[in-house]
Amino acid sequence: MDETKESEERSDAWRRALALFVAVLGMSVVQPTLLVALPFLVFVVLRGIRGTGVFFATLLAVVVVMTGPRDGTWYVERAWALMVGGIFAAVSLARPTWRLTSRTLLAVGVTAGVWVLIMVVRTDAWAAVDWVVTDELHAAYVTWLDVMRTVREGEVVSPAFASAIYRTVEMQVSVFPALVALESMAALAVAWWLYARLYRTGETSIGPLGGFRFNDHLVWVMIVGLLLVGIRTVDPVSRLGANLAVFMGALYALRGMGVVVSVSGGLSLFGYGLLALGILFAAPVVIGFAALFGIADTWLDLRARVGSAAT
């Protein structure tokens, strides 16, 4: 019976890792595979190569890290991935009993803090990074239009649809630091799953969505972000607020979905399909309600209340 449960847990963890990697691909500002490969290589350096699976995974990770044109972006992406991966590995080995969410949050928070200090000292560095990311996202938009024209055999894409996609790209440009932070958290979780799976550590890799939560005091980060957006001061301050609000809003939306899954006893495949359709066609509404549930859980602990009422 224990072996059956262990097998089911491994299967569930595999699905969660796949879902997180899809999320990494969806938010990709930094090269997605790099954000998984470099943190995994940090664990390999700390633990050594043990077994055939680790050897081939290490070889693939090295290829991912070393390939690509050696421009400024190449070095910036690897500096971020190495720093966030190194901090995450150190925290994971020193505090293995901490929640995975807590460890990824700490790693991303410390790394972001260091980069903010660098950008404050070297304002030209921030201008260069901002320009490079903006240029890459706009180039991706142009590439997408070209691909759509090719698929449609030269037929012009609807101006309204193209305009909607362009507004989405502009939003990504404005809040790309928040997207990088969210992408990094998801990628670190995938790297941790890969490490735990290949090294067979016996530690919990990725927990179920129904148990997703984080420190309740982080609600103040959300409040500060909304205040900075609301007061409409100079652009850097307002943009900082928008990034804080987007980052915490995404986490609270995920927490809210965890509340729904936990309270309902788990969603069926059909339920997850409906949720995916809701996000696809009415993302602001679905994510907004989910974030409200997540914020409410901060003060009301909805999962505990429903559990106590059931007993």
Image: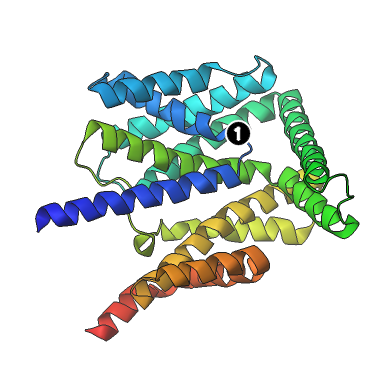
Of residue 165 and residue 301, the one placed in the foreground of this image is: 165
Report x, y in % for residue 4. 15, 56
Q: Which amino acid does label 1 sit on?
A: Val
Of residue 295 and residue 172, the one placed in the foreground of this image is: 172
> Is residue 298 at least partly visible in the picture?
no
SS for dot 1: loop
User: How many discs appear?
Assistant: 1
Q: Going by the picture, which residue comes out furthest to the left?
A: 1
Report x, y in % for residue 270. 46, 71
Report x, y in % for residue 243. 65, 49
Residue sitting at x 90%, y 55%:
159
Which of the 4 quarters of the picture holds residue 120?
Answer: top right
> Is residue 181 at least partly visible in the picture?
yes
Report x, y in % for residue 291. 55, 67
**Is 154 located above or below residue 55 in the figure?**
below
For the N terminus, the image quarter is: bottom left
For the C terminus, the image quarter is: bottom left
Residue sitting at x 70%, y 55%:
228
